[in-house]
Amino acid sequence: MSYCRISEGDVYMYHDVMGGIVCCGCRFRGENGSVFFRRSEALAHLEFHIENGDSVPDRAIKRLKEEIAEIGDNVEDEEIYNALLDL
């Protein structure tokens, strides 16, 4: 399930099945990352989008904060994600 979609604003961010949280088609790719293995990093990235004029639904910010409080900051193992990318 996505945190936010282009139809709701300017950003498409989702939890990838291989692990990590992806900011799909991110205009800041490389500057501020596009795959995150910590929810706090994904949250900071969404805030970066907002600071740079992009529209991000409040529920995306709220959901990440709730997940950090309830589940924790870590998403998935980065090594597993990178190994799957190499297949």
Image (spheres, rainbow, N blue to C red):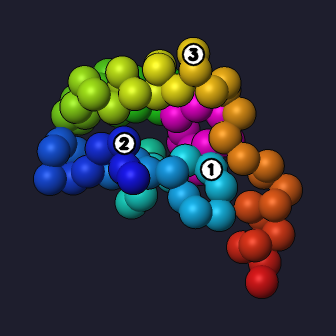
Q: Secondary structure at mark 2?
A: strand
Q: CA distance from mark 2 to mark 3?
A: 16 Å
Q: Which mark is residue 69?
A: 3
Q: Does dot 1 land on a helix, a strand or a loop?
A: loop
Lower sequence index among marks 1 and 2: 2
Residue 26 visible in image:
no
* Mark pair 1, 3: CA separation: 18 Å
Q: Earlier in the sequence, mark 1 or mark 3?
A: 1
Sequence-wise, the earlier of marks 2 and 3 is: 2
Q: CA distance from mark 1 to mark 2?
A: 13 Å
Q: Based on the displayed image, in which of its 4 quarters is residue 37 positioned?
A: top right
Mark number, residue 43: none
Q: In the rendered structure, which segment of residues is drawn in magenta?
A: 30-43
Please provide percent x and percent y for residue 85: 72, 73
Residue visible at 47% across and 20% down in the picture: 66
Q: Please state, as top left, top right, bottom left or bottom right, where the C terminus lies in the image.
A: bottom right
Residue tagged by mark 1?
A: 20
SS state under label 3: helix
Which of labels 1 and 3 is toward the front?
Answer: 3
Q: Which residue is mark 2?
A: 3
Q: Is residue 39 magenta?
A: yes
Task: Name above or below for residue 26 compared with residue 80.
Answer: above
Query: Against 44, is 29 above or below?
Result: below
Give the residue displayed 57% in from the left and 16% down from the top: 69
Q: Residue at 58% across / 31% down in the picture?
A: 39
Q: Amino acid at mark 3?
A: Ala
Q: Position of residue 25 (x, y in %)?
A: 39, 60
Q: Residue at x 14, y 53 (%)?
A: 7
